[in-house]
Amino acid sequence: MPMTIAGRSTRSPGRIPVEDPATADVFAEAPRCTSAQLDDAVVGAVDAFDAWSRSGADRRRAALLACGSVLAQAGDELAELLTAEQGKPLRQARAEVALAADWFGHTAELSLSRQRLVAEEATEVTLDRTPVGPVAAIAPSNYPVILAVTKIAPALLAGNTVVLKPSPVTPLASLRMGQLLAEVLPPGVFSTVSGDGDLGSALVAHPAIRMVSFTGSIRSGRAIARCAADSFKRVVLELGGNDPCILLPGTEVGRVAGDIFRRATVNSGQFCAAIKRVYAPSGQVAELTEALRAEAAAVTVGDGRDPGTDLGPLVSRAQLEHVHRLVDAAARAGGRVVTGGTALPRPGHFYPPTVVTDLPPGTDLEQDEQFGPVVPVIGYDDLDEAVARANGTRFALGGSVWGEPAVARDVAARLDCGTAWVNTHGDLRHDVPFGGLRDSGVGVEYGHWGLLEYTQIKITHTVRRP
């Protein structure tokens, strides 16, 4: 699958093996972008920027609608690539591509209007939102297509040009998307490059890049922030979460256990805004863990191409080993594995839905982000204790409270996070901003607020002379 650089399909002498996580077999290769090719992509973005930024909002909206149309028409092809490289069930891959196509349309409905700040007899001051310049968009492996489009669409609408680097684990659907979008965008406005972390570092450090939008690990986010600071590049960093869920005393377990389980294990737990830990009243822990165990027993884990599969594999061997290390360490510390707890004995990176309880305070399974289908259930005797433990990690992306709405809203207000949900979790919308606090990131994405991140303020101060 070639890269698309400045409107041209481009191959490279270097190759990146791409593995099918359902079999652990290498089934394809992606180009390994050279430094010269990266420079071509960024220079192409620079050369295209002036005309694109001056092309007018209506023209850019029309281009976004065309992008959405070509993605929708290639939905099955992209979904098959996505399942092959990422592992998620094919129906979920189709839904991701459809959402990405729709996202272009939703973004096209947004606008950036001039604001008149001062309107006096002799003086007028206006504020415009202007594009930043060439943008580096770096997407993760869990939702490669939609989390690329949530960066590409607002950046383009604002008048920026974009160079996309997908995860080296899941490059194929993104590279194909680059070919498709090249059919409807002017050369240089959007390019795709593929490579490992060294390529990402080079892209961020390129002097012509003026903004970096990244979704991924805290470690990589910190490195990007340090590098961007050298030239004062703008950054939007979504760095993952360890989202808590608090069950209020007296809440009927049977009414919420299924929702909690599904919102913890969506995409095999590989979702930044999934429930990562559950705090339940001590007297209800046994009932909740049994309900979650029953939910886990009803799930089919398998190849995403099998129509009967509910949960696919984890995306890589490294991710599988990370999840298992956290569960194994929790068990050795005294936690009780109710169900699951070990990789499935088959080829590929399969880990079963796992429920763990009786965790002592401070285990890595509570403090870190497992990013897998693991649900730790932690008992509490006092609601203040639950809130303190919910807020007691370096993460602050999302959190939820389940129970009577009026009480739950009061407790949700005490959660230190970017989004607090009541009786739901991980419900992301195109028209609602989403972002984290502390180690979960900087800035927001989605909707009008996300669009503003891809702009800078330009003030025009005019004095009228007689």
Image (spheres, grey):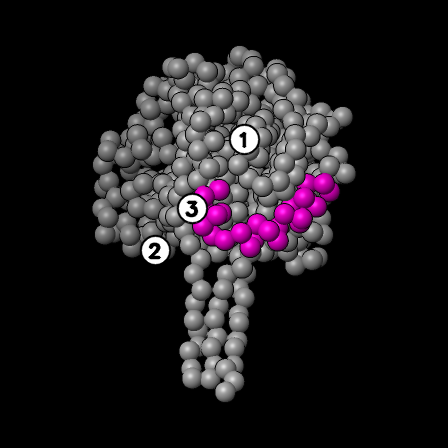
Q: Looking at the image, which is closer to me, 418 or 454?
A: 454
Q: Nearer the viewer, mark 2 or mark 3?
A: 3
Q: Is residue 447 visible?
A: yes
Looking at the rendered structure, the secondary structure element under dot 1 is helix
Label 1 vs label 3: CA separation? 18 Å
Q: Amino acid at mark 1?
A: Leu
Residue under label 3, please give it.
108
Rounded to the nearest angstrom, the CA distance separating label 2 from label 3 is 33 Å
Which residue lies under the disc numbered 2?
A: 413
Q: SS for tag 3?
A: helix
Find out whether residue 50 is within the magenta segment.
Answer: yes
Tell which circle, 1 or 2, labels the residue nearer the N-terminal end.
1
**Looking at the image, which residue is at 48% across and 56% down?**
452
Q: Which residues are magenta?
A: 39-63
Measured from the top left, where is residue 57 in percent x and y?
47, 52
User: Are discs 1 and 3 less than 8 Å apart at CB?
Assistant: no
Quadrant location of the N terminus in the rendered image: top right
Magenta segment, prevailing SS (helix, strand or loop) = helix
Identity, as a three-letter code, of the amino acid under mark 2: Ala
Q: Which residue is mark 1?
A: 180
Q: Earlier in the sequence, mark 2 or mark 3?
A: 3
